[in-house]
């Protein structure tokens, strides 16, 4: 999924007024995952990345081909720390700047989560924003083998 270019046709207030408040990444427990999907999930890492601004969250699932890609979840995800506190517009610009350093897997992961977040922000103007349950993280903890919040 492609993010809008900075300044592209989208309500600019969405990009300039909403700031990233927190991010979380969950690496799924491989043994649990094998019971849920028919695909072969051996020698790969799967999980969920969550990026938040206030009560709204954007999500992106990831599947990487080997444990060497994420190895240390904190090291893998810590590059996204520079997005915290920034507007969505600033985040889009930073992704373009760090694209080469982050690599395609990280770039796609954060772009997908931001696109999901932008869509939820646009929808929240049409309907009352749904504040997602605190239980969501507790459920994810049950099925994760590692977690990082920043």
Image: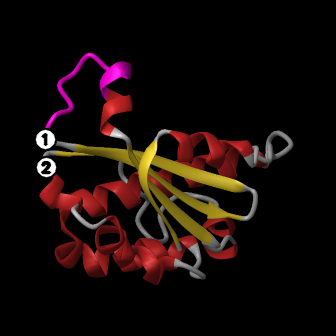
Q: Nearer the viewer, residue 52 or 142?
A: 142
Task: State the image coordinates of residue 87 (x, y, percent, origin top left).
Answer: 59, 77
Vertical order, 143 against 119 (above or below): above
- Would you say residue 62 is visible in this rendering? no
Q: Dot 1 corresponds to which residue?
A: 43
**Chain part drawn in magenta:** 34-43
Q: Nearer the viewer, residue 111 or 142?
A: 142
Q: Is residue 68 left or right of residue 81?
A: left
Task: State the image coordinates of residue 6 (x, y, percent, origin top left).
Answer: 45, 71
What residue lies at 57% left-to-right and 81% top-to-bottom? 86
The single residue placed furthest to the right in the displayed view is 128
What residue lies at 64% left-to-right and 46% top-to-bottom? 138
Q: How many numbered discs, if any?
A: 2
Vertical order, 126 against 148 (above or below): above
Q: Residues within 10 Å of mark 1 (few under 14, many from 20)?
A: few
What residue lies at 44% left-to-right and 83% top-to-bottom? 82
Asked which quadrant contains residue 128, the reply is top right
| Most frequent secondary structure within the magenta stretch | loop
Q: Dot 2 corresponds to which residue?
A: 66
Q: Is residue 54 left or right of residue 77?
A: right
């Amino acid at each position: 999924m492609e993010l809008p270019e900075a300044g592209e046709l989208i309500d600019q207030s969405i990009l300039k007024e909403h700031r990233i408040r927190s991010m979380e990444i969950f690496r799924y427990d491989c043994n649990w995952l094998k019971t849920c999907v028919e695909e072969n999930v051996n020698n790969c890492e799967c999980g969920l990345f969550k990026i938040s601004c206030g009560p709204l969250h954007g999500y992106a699932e990831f599947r990487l081909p080997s444990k060497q890609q994420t190895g240390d979840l904190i090291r893998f995800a810590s590059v996204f720390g520079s997005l915290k506190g920034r507007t969505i517009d600033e985040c889009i610009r930073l992704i373009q700047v760090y694209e080469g350093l982050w690599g395609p897997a990280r770039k796609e992961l954060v772009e997908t989560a931001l696109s999901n977040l932008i869509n939820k922000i646009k929808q929240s103007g049409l309907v009352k924003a749904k504040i997602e349950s605190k239980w969501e993280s507790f459920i994810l903890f049950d099925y994760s083998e590692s977690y990082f919040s920043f």
